Image: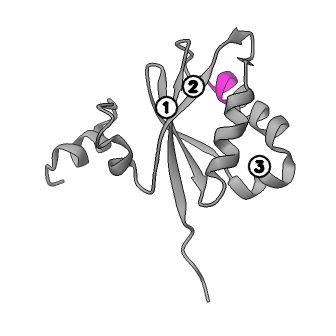
Amino acid sequence: MIYRRKIRYVLLELTSNLDMKIKENEYAFKNSLLSYMGEHNYANANPHIMRQDGDMFVVRVNRGMERELILATCFMKNIGNSRLGIYSLKTSGSIKGLLKDTGVYFKTRNVNRRLVGKKT
């Protein structure tokens, strides 16, 4: 049988305004995760940066590995040449549920359409 992959979304906040859309910063973030989580846990977690708005961003991770992701981000003190702190705010099974009570409003067109309830 083929099973659907179960994923969780983790909302993270940076103490510095680091743009994760830049490939070097995204690569440095993933490289830091790899060094803190190890190869086996990193492969099981399969983290991926989904969206970013200012100092907050959403990371997609496989279910059951969200605690390892949060723990690894607690140990990160710098990404590349930037010193920062990363805090986890909320974890959810959908992006809509993740942003429901946090007040974060991403500027991506498709997400905004779904959040305000307009039909596409």
The local secondary structure at tag 1 comes to: strand
Reply above or below: 99 against 64: above
The residue where tag 2 is placed is: 20
Q: Residues within 10 Å of mark 3 (few under 14, many from 20)?
A: many
Dot 3 or dot 2: first in sequence order is: 2
Q: Which residue is mark 1?
A: 57
Q: Residue 47: where, in percent of width, then height?
A: 65, 47
Instruction: Place residue 72 in its image quadrant.
Output: top right
| Magenta span of residues | 22-26
Image coloring type: one colour
Residue 82, located in which quarter of the rendered image? top right
Q: Earlier in the sequence, mark 1 or mark 2?
A: 2
Is-magenta flag for residue 93? Answer: no
- Residue nearest the observer in this picture, 69 or 105: 69
Earlier residue among tags 1 and 3: 3
User: Is there a contact, CB below 8 Å, between mark 1 and mark 2?
Assistant: yes
Q: Quadrant of the N terminus?
A: bottom right
Total marks shown come to 3
Looking at the rendered structure, the kind of residue marked 3 is Tyr
**77 or 4, which lies in front?**
77
Q: Main secondary structure of the magenta part?
A: helix
| Residue at the left extreme, as displayed | 118
